[in-house]
Amino acid sequence: MALSGHVVGLLKEYMGDLVEQAKQETAAHASFGFSATPYRSDQALSDLLAILDDRIESEGVQVGLPDGFLHQMWGFVTTPVPR
């Protein structure tokens, strides 16, 4: 799947949002005495797709994401990697 520079920039911004959200959640958990569990790659992809879903629903075309982008991302994430 080829991505334009604009879409890559949006994804980087969204990933930055994920990192900030994870930091805030870790701090909140630590304040209650809970230890953080390692953040797995499948959780990161799931969270990224959830953010994309929210952003596409609220901003969608306004930010320049192409129609069907989320569907393409799900297809990309769920496609098995050839060995």
Image (spheres, grey):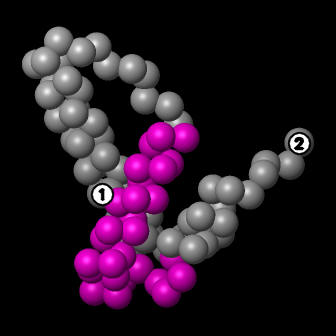
In this picture, is 52 found above or below 31? below
Q: Is residue 37 visible?
A: yes
Q: Residue at x 27, y 36 (%)?
A: 22
> How would you rate the neighbour count of disc 1 (Cα within 10 Å): few for under 14, some for 14-19, many for 20 or more?
few
**Is 49 contained in the magenta span?**
yes
59 and 31: which is toward the camera: 31
Task: Report the magenta residues as a range.
Answer: 42-69
User: Any magenta on residue 72?
Assistant: no
Measured as percent of width and height from the top left, residue 16 is found at 29, 48
- Residue marked by disc 1: 13
Q: Amino acid at mark 1?
A: Glu
How many numbered tags mark residues here?
2
Q: CA distance from mark 1 to mark 2?
A: 32 Å
The residue positioned 57% from the left and 74% from the top of the image is 71
Q: Is residue 62 above or below residue 20?
A: below
- Residue 75 vs residue 25: left or right? right
